[in-house]
Image: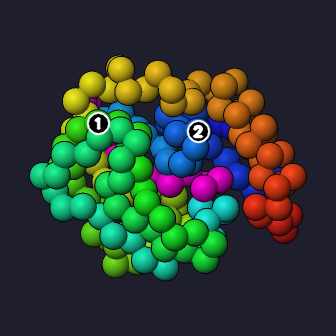
Amino acid sequence: MAKHEEIFLPDDLYYDRKDHLWAKLEGGKVRVGLDMFGQKAAGTAAYIKILPVGKTVQKTRAFGSLEAGKYIGPLKAPVTGKIVEINNEVIANPRLVNTDPYGKGWFVIIESANFDNDIHDLVHGAENIQAWLDAEYKDYMEKGLFAEE
């Protein structure tokens, strides 16, 4: 598991470098959530809106939006496919994004159209994830995007 300070990123997930969403392959379907780094940078989640089940989403296009203490903006799909499930629990209680990002804090499950093609630019594998996390943390600290606690 990649770790830096209080941030950890499980090795079995795929990570979007820019939007800090994680993707977990579950038998042809992909569960999507906000990684711990992203939720630390965004602040406390206050409101989440997600497209309905049945909608088709394109990789890098919005499947919903997040309003948090330091971020208001789109949640962009890490893969192309059809939304087959949304997490109503996180919509009702957005703070789950902050308190349980890899458990109850997920957003959607997407039936992937071409997972193998979509994952080429996602970060995966223990060494790759750790190197990316270290570089990203340093970059965010230098830009003052979040403060040391």
- Give the extent of the magenta segment: 27-38
Which quadrant of the view contains residue 124? Answer: top right
The kind of residue tagged 2 is Arg
Vertical side of 28 occupied by 87: above or below:
below
Image location of residue 109, percent across then percent down: 28, 48
Residue at image x 21%, y 54%?
A: 85
The kind of residue tagged 1 is Thr
- Say which residue label 1 marks: 80
- Say which residue label 2 marks: 17
| Residue 59: mark in rendering | none
Residue closer to the observer: 129 or 103:
129
Residue at image x 43%, y 77%?
A: 47
Vertical side of 63 occupied by 17: above or below:
above
Vertical side of 68 occupied by 100: above or below:
above
Secondary structure at numbered mark 1: loop
User: Would residue 45 appear left or right of 54 to someone viewing this image?
Assistant: right
Image location of residue 149, percent across then percent down: 84, 68
Pointer 1 and pointer 2: residues touching (CB < 8 Å)?
no
Image location of residue 77, percent across then percent down: 37, 45
> How far apart are the alpha carbons under marks 1 and 2?
17 Å
Image location of residue 111, percent across then percent down: 21, 38
Q: Quadrant of the N terminus?
A: top right
Residue 34: in magenta span: yes
